[in-house]
Amino acid sequence: MSKKRKIMNIIATVLKYAILILGALFTLMPFLWMIISSLKTPAEITAIPPKLLPSVPQWSNYAEAWKAAPFPRYFLNTIIVTIFSTIGVLATAILSAFAFSRLNFPGKKLVFSLFLATLMIPGEMLIITNFITITKLKWIDTYQAMIVPYMSNVFYIYLLTQFFSQVPDSLYLAAKVDKCSDFKFMMKIMVPMNKSAITTIAILNIIGCWNSFLWPLLVTNDRNMRVISNGLVRFQTEAGSDYQLIMAASTIMVMPIIIVYLFLRKYIIEGVTQSGLKS
Amino acid sequence: MEKKSMKGYIYLMPALIVILLFTAYPLIRAFLMSFYEDYNMISGEYSRIGLGNYKDLFGDKDFTKALRNTSIYVVFVVPCSIALSLLIAVLLNSNIKCQGLFQTIFFLPYVTSVIAIGLVWSWIFNSNYGLLNIILSWFGIDKVQWLNKPKYALPSLIIFSVWKSMAFDILIFLAGLQTIPKDLYNASRVDSTPRWRVFWKITVPGIAPMISYAFIMGFISAFKVYNEVFSLWGGKAGPANSAITVVYYIYDKFYNSHNYGLASAAAVILFLIILVLTIVQRMMGRKK
């Protein structure tokens, strides 16, 4: 009996790892295929019968792709939008979370539930009017068109309010006795105490900004204003069948976020998990 | 807490302005515009107020197709992703080596751009040189016209999306599994309860809230599928519009055809679908 059980256990363990490794390969496959394809020669990429690996890795494809379209400009635009959007999102979230967690004002509960209610609205429904608004403001082809409409994120406000509420009231009262102003208290006590939650929000927002696609596409016509995701799609239609270059360009777009993810995955995974467990 | 004062609103002001201008106002406008017939965006004129746009919408074959496609998509992507993710998460949670490494790999699709990785998938699906057909050829299966034939358009989109959405589901399930007390499993080991019974009697009830959360979130985000379509077919909705989705329809009607009324009516329908799902989620959340 115990011998049979032992064998069963070994089989179960082997099966377990086999499924996990298969799953991991399935997950990694597009990334691996992207990098492998980006290193092939034009002849190799359309070889029949297909060749799995390049005989000599063509690193020059990256330089060629980088120069084939204004990618430096796309990168610059994306970085500008990401930085200012993240600063804006953090500022509105910190200020609102402080108001909701520490200050007492008429209609607080109502405003808070109205804020939360906006989470139900699909953003896709808002783009029609927002596009008209941006057109009327004459903001087409400007950075603010890509930054301002997304400067307030209710989900982050909600998350940060939860964290701010956990800071004991006694600290706030002590600060009041010391004649510390609310603003100073917020900046000197609340923000440093919740550094890791704020970092998580910043990272999630940076990833969201970097990958955003539809809205920047709508509000930019000028190629000099394109962000990287829009530029990449345009490059695909221009590059035609030069798939090794398209794959190199995709790798260039994906790499910065993968690097951020590998270094800061603790914050990202924590933030996303919290979003799931809290709501 | 101190006495009530208006000071709170000073702190709320920045967020409030953005939300009023770019969330509340467009929400109301979308509802209104959906009732304006022959609406002109520049002059703001319309011929009359009525249900004309909704009549046109449900008379439009493209919209009914978009609704049908989106529903098929949702029904396949969400349960497939949840079932596979549950399997992976349960295995990950059992005493495993390199758990952190596996977790890092499985979450990777969540952080990468749908557009960039969608281009990779369109290359994987390429009928002549794509990896998928290469692998299929090892098993003697003929070339499949993944992206070029209408009947394979939705399956291609679904495969890509399952790959993408598993990342989130695995993470949520794993977090849920780690909240189940280890004692429960130890007790079952002493009793030598069969594995499948442990799974149904301990694991599934233990993470039931996460499963229902993953279902609702999956439904909501799947109803909004757009970027995946755009990147697989380079801005088109598949061969002969075979992969058109609701959000693709909204975007196409307002950006390419400048039919704001029709686009708004479609957006209101999307809103109602999501509203119902959110209410279902709230009700399920309350029961617990």
Image (tube, rainbow, N blue to C red):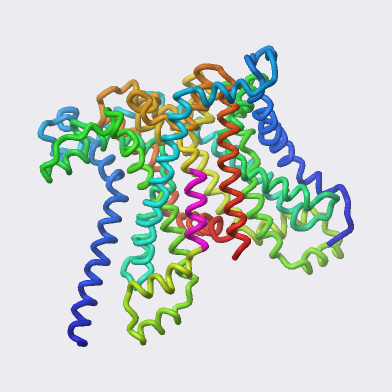
In the rendering, at what x and y percent does residue A55 appear?
Answer: 13, 39
In the rendering, at what x and y percent does residue A186 appear?
Answer: 74, 55
Q: Is residue B104 shown above or below A203?
A: below
Q: Is residue B104 shown above or below A55?
A: below
In the rendering, at what x and y percent does residue B78 appear?
Answer: 42, 49
- Residue at (42% x, 73% y) in the render: B201
In the rendering, at what x and y percent does residue A229 appear?
Answer: 44, 32
Look at the image and give the residue range highlighted in magenta.
B209-221
- Residue at (55% x, 54% y) in the render: A200
Q: Is residue A208 shown above or below B52?
A: below
A54 or B197: nearer the viewer? B197
Question: Is residue B214 found inside the magenta-colored segment of the image?
Answer: yes
A113 or B5: nearer the viewer? A113
- Residue at (84% x, 48% y) in the render: B7
- Residue at (48% x, 57% y) in the render: A269
Quarter of the image that includes the C terminus of chain A? bottom right
Q: Is residue B224 left or right of residue B261?
A: left
B282 or B95: nearer the viewer? B282
Question: Is residue A170 found inside the magenta-colored segment of the image?
Answer: no
Decide if residue A29 is in sight here: yes
Q: In which quarter of the image is residue A37?
A: top left
Decide if residue A53 is in sight here: no
Q: In this view, does B217 lie to the left or right of B90?
A: right
B91 or B272: nearer the viewer? B272
Q: Is the magenta stretch mostly helix, strand or loop?
A: helix
Q: Is residue A217 shown above or below A179?
A: above
